[in-house]
Image: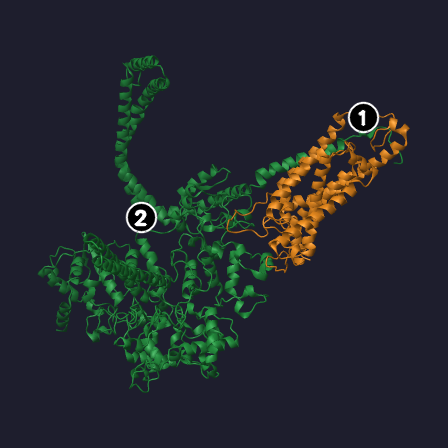
Amino acid sequence: MDLHQLWTILSAPDNIAIVVLLLAVPFYAWYGLRQAFANDRLIDRLEADPEMAKTHHRKTQPYRPEWDKEVHVWPYLLRIEFLAAIIVTVILLVWSIAINAPLEEPANPTLTMNPAKAPWYFLGLQEMLVYFDPWIAGVVMPTLIILGLMAIPYIDTNPLGSGYYTFKQRKFAILTFFFGFLVLWLTMIFIGTFIRGPGWMWFWPGQTWDPNRVIFEVNRDLPDIFGITSRAGKFFFGATVIAAWCVAAGVFIHKLITATPFSRKIYRRMSLLQYAVMQFFLIGMLSLPVKILARLLFRIKYVWVTPWFNV
Amino acid sequence: MSERPERDPVVHSSLSRPLVIWSALLVVVLAWALYDETYGIRPWKGYEARFRKLYAGYLANAGLGEAEYERRLKASPEYHRLDAEMQAAEKAARPEASAIDRRINSGLEPKILALNGSFQEIRSRIAALTYEIETTRSAGRKNALRGEIASLQAEVHRIELPGEPPQPMNFDQISTRLQQMKDEKARLLDRRVEVMRQASALRAQRDQYLSDRIPNASLATIASVQHGLDKFDIGIRQIHVADIDLVDRCESCHLGTREPIQLTAAAMGGEAVFTSHPDQDLLKIHDPEKFGCTPCHGGNGVAVTSVEKAHGENEHWLWPLHHKENIEAGCQQCHAREIVTEMAGTLNQGREIFRLRGCAACHRYDGFDREAEEMTSVSQQTRALAQQKAATLREAGFRVQQADQAATNAEARRLYQQATDLQVESSQLDAKIDELDQRSHELVREEKKTGPDLKEVRMKLRKEWIPVWLKDPHAWREGTKMPTFRLDDSEIRAISAFLWQSGVDPEWGRPPGLPGARSAHTTPEQTAPGDPAKGKEAFETRGCLACHSMGEGAARQGGTFAANLSREGEKANYDYLVRWILNPRQRTAPYCPFEKRDLTPADYARHNLPYVFDLDHDKCPNDGHQLQVEQMTPMPSLRLSQDEARDIASYLMTCKRPNFGYAPAAYMDDPALKARGLALVRNYGCAGCHEIAGLEEEQRIGTELTREGSKPLERFDFALLLPKAEAEGWHTHKGFFDHKLTDPAVFDQGKEKAKQDRLKMPNFNLSKPEIDALTTLLEGSVDPTVPESYTYAPADQRADIIEGWWVVRKYNCMGCHRIHVGQTTVFDTLPRYRDPDWKDQVPPTLIGEGARVRPDWLMRFLENPALSDKETNRDGVRRYLKVRMPTFYFSGGEVRKLVRFFAALSSQPEPFVEETLEPLTAEERTMARALFTSPGAPCLKCHMTGDPAHDAKATAPDFTIARERLQPDWTRRWMLDPAAISPGTAMPSGLFTHQDGRWVFAGQKPSVFNGYQKDEADLLLRYMFEFTPQELSRLRAGMRN
């Protein structure tokens, strides 16, 4: 266990933001969920007790009927925001005084640094380069991510859960977010920052980043495993596998969407276009970890090999 | 949730406490930010404040001591004289000067001031109107404005000048009058300078006298510095060199660097940061305003936020400050063309090791071993040109054929013309080939190898010694150039077998009728025994020790340029030694680089040529290419007699340890080992230093080092030592070089590698200072960070100095001669030469050689130091010396370089200007002769006369060669004050004294001199430059009588 190596990575000024992120995101996820569950319990009580619903506001605050049901933004909200602004200012000031910008040597076109890493917020994209063709990982996927985020308001047909924390009423949205952001995006940033060392090799935390390390790792294409050598054979085999996967994933997602009466109700509100767009992005999202695992666990490089692109 | 609060917490709970706490924190952090901004990231402010305090304290103390010293100095008669002269001159000039001052101050100046106001006012109004004219479009308006200007100019003002009645003046009059007064003032000021000229010159002289004698700083300097310190402000001090875009702020902390007072750490309260630059002379040449600091020292000149960053020792800064022991690395980037750079001792040592130890044999480095590269390029060019010429001639032949069969006359003429043109072209190619030929002829002499020729092993060496030597050369011979390769026994066997079997067969080409000689290439005389005792004397006095050393450990004596010969008798063959001493350049067989083999007598016989090859017969009989006809050793010939060579060889054969012995090595004749041996020799790059049969054209096996210092650190293979290097702080260029040189195999540690894949660089057993010197060179071998114009590449005589040093180093001239001030020669270290009797036996110093001798003579002398083709067993100039200037067989180019080098060192004009002397009259000749032989000037007592009995005791050269050898100007200076030119010389000083503007002989003069009014030193000089052998014999005859 090379603690010095671990400390070197953790303490690099570049990585401070990531370390904070790794702690802060799960904490706030937990904190938000806690509030959401509390709200859900209150909603259950209010739904069960119409008398109470008449006088009680829909917050989990301690409450007495003689208190105001609503309070003004000023000063009750703004003073809290003001305090928060002060706290954030103090933190940012201390940070900027204590830690300088992590500048490195002037760029040398004849020398690539090892490992050559993107800024932390792009490390997830860079990690995707390991699993896909550069133009898929670098162009298609980021575009899809942006388009997918843009599409959310248009495919979201659930009218509930606006303005307060709730899990019960937005299970699907929250789980999708957790999967896309926490599992995919953050995990890849984590891998890119802490796991990938010189030569973009896989180093477990605490393993020394030795630039001279040599490992044996041969990746194969899926058709090779099945002994398919001809170009056409590879093309059609790959296309078949991909198509089969899309169908299977689509069915799986459809089952998820229509799992409960509530979600079926939402599903019925969707138009065909909305549903198709949602399926498209969800299948794409689901494919990513599958490909990563296929690569990491079974050393499969590409599934669909064509002369023009590889997937 | 046990008890509900009475009041709504959202409305009634107070946030004051967190708000107060965080606001207080915010204020604290803001204060911190302010502090950080002002002091935290500006540590130099503290340095400046401390410097000011310490410096003021130091100055106050220094002033006291200096004052006493200065008072004493001012009391000296010399100072009094200068001061009195100055005062007198000032007094004489004072009345006129004060008259001028009065006229200017009370007469002119107030009037100029008074008039100037009116003048300026009108002029600015005119200027404003003119601008309006220029920018107005309307012609009418322009004219109106012009009129306005005219009226302004014509307007009459009432001008009142001090001391004059008011008068009416228009603009022109004002301006004329003003100009007149200004001219008058300038004239008066000029006059004042003229009047005071003598006084100010004398004042400067007086102050110079003081400042020359005050070691540190005069009171005046101290006072001015103190005054400056009063105005000391705290701010960034930076050097900005605009044309190289350089900003160096080093002096923001290193405030004492350029102080006029030399500051030591002790004087500044132990703070080394405030010391002055240790070498002010260096700073004078490299003015920091033009060169900055970081181009030489490294570091990050812009950074001032922390010491670590300013010194560039933080990660990612590419050029950290050079360590103290490698500080001269900074010189190399601009002085890369030199082998000797003044004031850079460590760097020079590094270059010398690099050259002498054969680093350039494996590692290319621009400038080093360039003869070998040039040789290759010349032969390639020759080959290409020859092909081109053949093609041209072939083409010309075709044209002639076509022309012969041409249909029309016109067509035939055209083709003939083309053929002629092609023939002309081919003769132009011929001229180019000739030129290259000439160069290759020279290069044959210039190209040297670091180690001996291994084709000669069978003649030269004891067979069984070779494996012993290969095992560990440093164990056998301490400090040898040959490095230790990490060879195992089987490798040693194979290499020895290969070398032995590829050597020239001693029996090869043995002429019939030479029985008894061990080798065919030594004559019977060379095998006869000599006298070791005489040989020892000759070895120690002839000059062998200038390069070679003798004795081991503490008993070691002599130079380090060539091998230590203490155990020579254990390895060498006697007859080969005799041959080698007689002429080390003699080759056994010429090598043809075109056929890539040594030529045999059969090759010559085929062309009915005798087997003769030397510098005059150096073309291949088979193909006409340049042959290598010399051994590629810098060892010169001492032009010894056969007897002496035998004596020395006999002596060397006695140099051995008692009871030495070698294990038999029969395997060396095993042909089965040869192939493996060849592969190993190739693998280890032996042919870089040695000439080896079949491997003459091998390339260098190492990486190029010309720019090694700027190679990115990531490209250095620290291998498994990387984590260690990082942890121990030597993951730097210096760290790599130091560790690699200390143990060249260090980066193989822990690696699993086959033998042939391991690092090949052998161990040179370098000492710590040697490693520092080499690291200095390598650290400095960078892509220059400054533009080309900063590179030291002078076009004048200094270029000759750069080139000359390469030759001087190549042949170790400094083993015998002192070439620059402060240098020691090997003779200074030899105990024998400390004896007073031997003091005059050391080789002459060459400081000022360019001024002393004529360049044409020096050229002849360097080509043939015996100055004779027949009598070679002598020294041309100083026959009384036991040591002898050897024959180096310099190429023409090398001789020229040396001659120009000496001329440039002595700042002689280029080209050489001959000084003509007035011929002697008959009367003067009689006088000179009388003086020359008078008891007061016993010139011929020490100078050689050609009489063997006398010359045996002589300690100075012959006069007969003075005319062609010496330069009159130098000779004059030498006669007048030899001690000033060569301290400690046997030539007496004070032969002449200065009287009434001429030099007269100081001793008793012959009577003929009565009434002679001319310069007597000059008379003697002119006599010397008309001296002939006839004159000498005449004098000798006269002396005998």
Q: Residue furthest left?
A: B922
Q: Measured from the top left, where is residue B31 in percent x and y? A: 63, 36
* Residue B1025 at x, y percent in the picture: 17, 61
Which residue does the image show at 23% across and 57% down from the upper left? B419
Report the chain holding disc 1: A
B683 over B271 or under it: above or below: below
Q: Say how the picture is coloured.
A: by chain
The answer to whether tags 2 and 1 share a subunit is no
Q: Residue at x 65, y 59 (%)?
A: A227
SS under mark 1: loop
Mark identifier at residue A70: 1
Secondary structure category for the residue under label 2: helix
The furthest residue to the front: B407
Q: Is B760 placed above or below B254 here?
A: below
**Quadrant containing the N terminus of chain B in the rendered view:** top right
Q: Where does the image place residue B797, in percent across and percent down from the top left? A: 30, 53
**Label 2 belongs to which residue?**
B77
**Residue B370 placed where, x, y %?**
37, 61
Quarter occupied by the C terminus of chain B: bottom left
Q: Tell which chain the image draws in orange.
A: A
The colour of chain B is: green
Residue occupying the point 25% across, 76% down:
B608
Position above or below: B152 against B940? above
Asked which quadrant contains residue A47, the reply is top right
